[in-house]
Protein backbone atom coordinates (compact mmCIF):
# COMPACT_ATOMS: atom_id res chain seq x y z
CA UNK A 1 0.00 0.00 0.00
CA UNK A 2 2.95 2.32 0.62
CA UNK A 3 3.82 2.29 -3.09
CA UNK A 4 0.22 3.16 -3.94
CA UNK A 5 0.27 6.12 -1.57
CA UNK A 6 3.60 7.30 -3.00
CA UNK A 7 2.28 7.06 -6.56
CA UNK A 8 -0.90 8.94 -5.64
CA UNK A 9 1.11 11.70 -4.00
CA UNK A 10 3.37 11.99 -7.04
CA UNK A 11 0.30 12.13 -9.29
CA UNK A 12 -1.24 14.77 -7.03
CA UNK A 13 1.94 16.85 -7.20
CA UNK A 14 2.00 16.62 -10.98
CA UNK A 15 -1.65 17.57 -11.26
CA UNK A 16 -1.08 20.43 -8.82
CA UNK A 17 1.76 21.89 -10.89
CA UNK A 18 -0.27 21.53 -14.07
CA UNK A 19 -3.16 23.28 -12.32
CA UNK A 20 -0.98 26.19 -11.27
CA UNK A 21 0.37 26.59 -14.80
CA UNK A 22 -3.12 26.24 -16.26
CA UNK A 23 -4.50 28.81 -13.85
CA UNK A 24 -1.80 31.28 -14.83
CA UNK A 25 -2.58 30.61 -18.50
CA UNK A 26 -6.24 31.40 -17.84
CA UNK A 27 -5.35 34.58 -15.94
CA UNK A 28 -3.29 35.89 -18.84
CA UNK A 29 -6.09 35.13 -21.28
CA UNK A 30 -5.06 32.03 -23.18
CA UNK A 31 -7.62 30.09 -25.25
CA UNK A 32 -11.03 29.23 -23.78
CA UNK A 33 -10.32 25.50 -23.94
CA UNK A 34 -7.81 26.07 -21.14
CA UNK A 35 -10.72 26.59 -18.72
CA UNK A 36 -12.26 23.20 -19.53
CA UNK A 37 -8.88 21.49 -19.26
CA UNK A 38 -8.24 23.25 -15.93
CA UNK A 39 -11.61 22.07 -14.61
CA UNK A 40 -11.04 18.48 -15.74
CA UNK A 41 -7.54 18.29 -14.28
CA UNK A 42 -8.76 19.97 -11.10
CA UNK A 43 -11.45 17.31 -10.75
CA UNK A 44 -8.78 14.62 -11.12
CA UNK A 45 -6.69 16.36 -8.47
CA UNK A 46 -9.64 16.37 -6.05
CA UNK A 47 -10.24 12.69 -6.80
CA UNK A 48 -6.62 11.91 -5.86
CA UNK A 49 -7.03 14.04 -2.72
CA UNK A 50 -10.16 12.11 -1.79
CA UNK A 51 -8.50 8.74 -2.38
CA UNK A 52 -5.65 9.72 -0.06
CA UNK A 53 -8.24 10.95 2.45
CA UNK A 54 -10.15 7.67 2.38
CA UNK A 55 -6.93 5.69 2.78
CA UNK A 56 -6.11 7.92 5.75
CA UNK A 57 -9.51 7.26 7.31
CA UNK A 58 -8.85 3.53 7.33
CA UNK A 59 -5.09 3.46 7.93
CA UNK A 60 -4.54 6.12 10.57
CA UNK A 61 -5.67 6.05 14.17
CA UNK A 62 -6.01 9.86 14.20
CA UNK A 63 -8.63 10.43 11.52
CA UNK A 64 -9.15 14.18 11.90
CA UNK A 65 -6.78 15.26 9.15
CA UNK A 66 -8.14 12.63 6.77
CA UNK A 67 -11.71 13.77 7.37
CA UNK A 68 -10.72 17.43 7.00
CA UNK A 69 -8.96 16.55 3.73
CA UNK A 70 -12.15 14.98 2.36
CA UNK A 71 -14.18 18.05 3.33
CA UNK A 72 -11.55 20.42 1.94
CA UNK A 73 -11.57 18.50 -1.36
CA UNK A 74 -15.32 19.06 -1.62
CA UNK A 75 -14.78 22.77 -0.92
CA UNK A 76 -12.07 22.97 -3.60
CA UNK A 77 -14.37 21.30 -6.11
CA UNK A 78 -17.31 23.56 -5.24
CA UNK A 79 -15.23 26.74 -5.38
CA UNK A 80 -13.69 25.76 -8.69
CA UNK A 81 -17.08 25.07 -10.25
CA UNK A 82 -18.84 28.10 -8.76
CA UNK A 83 -16.14 30.73 -8.96
CA UNK A 84 -17.30 32.34 -12.20
CA UNK A 85 -20.56 33.36 -10.52
CA UNK A 86 -18.95 34.66 -7.32
CA UNK A 87 -18.23 38.39 -7.07
CA UNK A 88 -18.55 39.13 -10.77
CA UNK A 89 -17.03 42.34 -12.04
CA UNK A 90 -14.01 44.24 -10.87
CA UNK A 91 -13.76 42.43 -7.53
CA UNK A 92 -13.61 38.95 -9.08
CA UNK A 93 -9.84 38.94 -8.58
CA UNK A 94 -10.55 38.25 -4.89
CA UNK A 95 -12.21 34.94 -5.83
CA UNK A 96 -9.34 34.08 -8.16
CA UNK A 97 -6.79 34.62 -5.40
CA UNK A 98 -8.97 32.68 -2.94
CA UNK A 99 -9.22 29.81 -5.45
CA UNK A 100 -5.44 29.80 -5.82
CA UNK A 101 -4.86 29.77 -2.04
CA UNK A 102 -7.47 27.06 -1.46
CA UNK A 103 -5.81 24.92 -4.15
CA UNK A 104 -2.37 25.41 -2.61
CA UNK A 105 -3.80 24.42 0.77
CA UNK A 106 -5.22 21.26 -0.82
CA UNK A 107 -1.77 20.46 -2.17
CA UNK A 108 -0.38 20.97 1.34
CA UNK A 109 -3.00 18.65 2.80
CA UNK A 110 -2.11 16.01 0.23
CA UNK A 111 1.55 16.28 1.23
CA UNK A 112 0.87 16.21 4.98
CA UNK A 113 -1.54 13.29 4.87
CA UNK A 114 0.76 11.43 2.49
CA UNK A 115 3.68 11.96 4.87
CA UNK A 116 1.62 10.55 7.73
CA UNK A 117 0.60 7.53 5.66
CA UNK A 118 4.14 6.82 4.46
CA UNK A 119 5.40 7.10 8.04
CA UNK A 120 3.17 4.17 8.87
CA UNK A 121 5.48 2.14 6.63
CA UNK A 122 4.56 -1.43 5.96
CA UNK A 123 1.45 -1.18 8.15
CA UNK A 124 -0.31 0.81 5.42
Image (cartoon, rainbow, N blue to C red):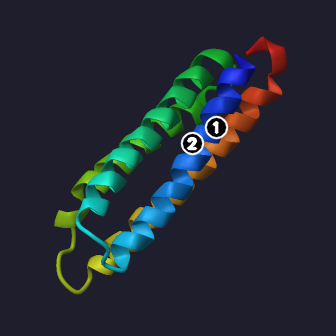
Name the residue rendered at 58%, 39% in the picture: 11
Depth check, front residue: 66 or 35: 35
Measuring from the top left, give residue 47's x and y in whole percent: 43, 34
Depth check, front residue: 13 or 87: 13
The secondary element bearing badge 2 is classed as: helix
Viewer can see residue 106? no
Total labels: the figure holds 2
Residue 60 higher or lower than 11, as above or below: above
Measuring from the top left, give residue 108's x and y in whole percent: 62, 51
The secondary element bearing badge 1 is classed as: helix
Name the quarter where the N terminus is drawn.
top right
Measuring from the top left, give residue 17's x and y in whole percent: 56, 57
Name the quarter where the C terminus is drawn.
top right
Name the residue rendered at 33%, 53% in the picture: 37
The residue under label 1 is 9
Q: Which mark is residue 116?
A: none
Name the residue rendered at 51%, 37% in the picture: 49
Residue lying farthest to the top in this orientation: 123
Viewer can see residue 31? yes
Q: Residues within 10 Å of mark 1 (few under 14, many from 20)?
A: many
Residue lying farthest to the bottom in this orientation: 90
The residue under label 2 is 12
Q: Is residue 57 left or right of residue 75?
A: right
Q: Is residue 1 left or right of residue 50?
A: right
Measuring from the top left, give residue 123's x and y in whole percent: 79, 12
Measured in 3D between alpha carbons, the distance from the residue under mark 2 to the one under mark 1, in whole angstroms, is: 5 Å
Q: Dots 2 and 1: beta carbons under 8 Å?
A: yes
Name the residue rendered at 36%, 76% in the picture: 27
Residue 5 higher or lower than 25, as above or below: above
Amino acid sequence: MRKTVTMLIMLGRLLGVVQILGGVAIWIGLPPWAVQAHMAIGSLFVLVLWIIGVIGLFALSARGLALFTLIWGAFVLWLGMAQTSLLPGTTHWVIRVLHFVVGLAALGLLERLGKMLRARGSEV
